[in-house]
Amino acid sequence: MDTVDSSEAPASLEPEPRVPAEPLPRLFWRFLRFGLLAWGGPIAQIAMIRQELVEEEKWVSPAHFNRTLALYQILPGPEAHELCVYFGMLARGRVGGLLAGLGFMLPGLLLMLLCSWLYVRVGLDSPWVRAAFTTVQAAVAALIVRAVHRIGGHAFTRRSLLVIALLAAVAQLVGVPFFLTLAWAGLTAVLLHAGSRGAAVALTAGCALAAGLLLTFVSPESAAPLAASPAGAPQGVLSLLGSGLRTGLLTFGGAYTAIPFLQRDAVARGGWMTDAQFLDGLALGGVLPAPLIIFGTFVGYLGGGLPGALAMTAGIFAPAFGMTLLAHHPLERLVHHPRARILLDGVTAGVVGLIGGTALPLLRAAVDDVPTGLVFAGALVVLFRAKARLAPMAVLAAAALVGLGVHAFSGM
């Protein structure tokens, strides 16, 4: 369909007659321009979209925009990208949503493919490049710690959710499968909210017993079929597509929540990357004009070259497209159901715990001497105190300069 009839919208959403039915090429160019200017992370990206489409051109009311943004903050996927798909659908239906989403992600995708190619072909053999990346990795570790704090600040609306997150972090560290952890987190939140503390304790004990038996009697090779691949071995396109799809479906609260799932597949199980390479990909994703989740393209490229990069990217972004194009209105009704929101709150707390559990090995890989320790500490202070939208990019750039300076001084 070419336009969206306001009569098809749910009763809770007021009609928006001012949404223009833009020609498809012009619509694609508008969101391609957004993608070219998408520097500074999700906050800056969302502010840019709001400024032009809500405040200047008044496609929707501010209240409508806030409700839509709240919905996408609960659902998995990068919010800025999903907002582009949503506005494209308002203007020209599903075709418009598809073009808007592709336009927004295309600049970052192409740049990440170029960076991945250079990383693999040219490598980090230059001591100057390696010195810069070493300190940038420490800054990325600080970004992850800050993200855990920021996401947790919004997610831990009740003390019980903080406890769920801490237990999920422990489960991640000891190797409990993430699907068991997230199922436990969601159900436990529902039981505790209903006042069934005894049932929640029993569920926790049962899951702990099941996890213990799994870790005791199931070998790592049988529990993780990808582990049989030797380090650096190419992965199948379908395997990388499946990894990306799992990540896209389990990414709650922003791109940082994708870290434990991709790190598990690429480093802990697949073995086609090291923690240091994973941090390099995160650093590249943090400085490109794209949702941070675009670092998944880098992960896929190291696993399977260009086909692997495209497969991983398609898998990660498929839920973000699909939830808006196919199921936005039913999902909006679902997430406003009280018990569904409680379940999602629990799952989100579990995901925050998974990020925290994943951050520790990444931190050990990134901070292993005095210079990287100082960069990590300094970056953490700046990230906690700075309010500027471009602070993460500035931190990464400063970390690279510190690395270059240390290398130059040590060579004198």
Image: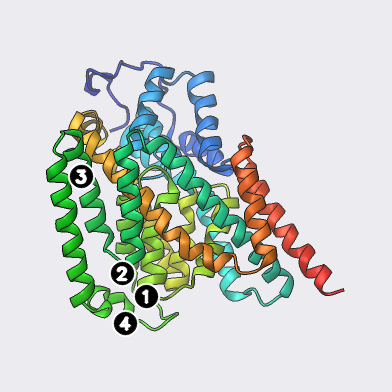
Residue 228 circle label: 4
Mark 3 and mark 2 lie on one chain; the one further toward the N terminus is 3
What amino acid type should be assigned to the residue bearing mark 2? Answer: Ser
Residue at 44% x, 37% y: name it. Answer: 153
The image's colour scheme reads rainbow
Foreground residue among 178 and 307:
178
Which of the two discs, 1 and 3, sits closer to the camera?
3
Q: Please say if the residues under marks 2 and 1 sit with CB atoms less than 8 Å apart.
A: yes
Q: Which mark is residue 239?
A: 2
Amino acid at pointer 3: Thr
Q: CA distance from mark 3 to mark 4?
A: 34 Å
> Is residue 403 shown above or below 51?
below
Q: CA distance from mark 4 to mark 1?
A: 11 Å
Instruction: Tell me which residue sits at (22%, 58%) in the image.
Output: 180
Q: Which mark is residue 281?
A: none
- First in residue order: circle 1 vs circle 3: 3
* Circle 3 residue: 188
First of labels 4, 2 by sequence position: 4
Q: CA distance from mark 2 to mark 1?
A: 7 Å
Contact (Cβ within 8 Å) of mark 4 with mark 2: no
At mark 4, the secondary structure is helix
- x and y percentages locating residue 139 in the rendered image: 61, 56
Q: Which amino acid is tagged 4?
A: Ala
Q: Nearer the viewer, mark 3 or mark 4?
A: 3
Q: CA distance from mark 3 to mark 2?
A: 31 Å
Residue 165 percent across, percent down from the top left: 34, 48
The x and y percentages for residue 65 are: 41, 24
Q: Which residue is mark 1?
A: 235
Say whether residue 100 is visible: no
The structure residue drawn at horizontal position 75% and vertical position 58%, both measured from the top left corner, is 401
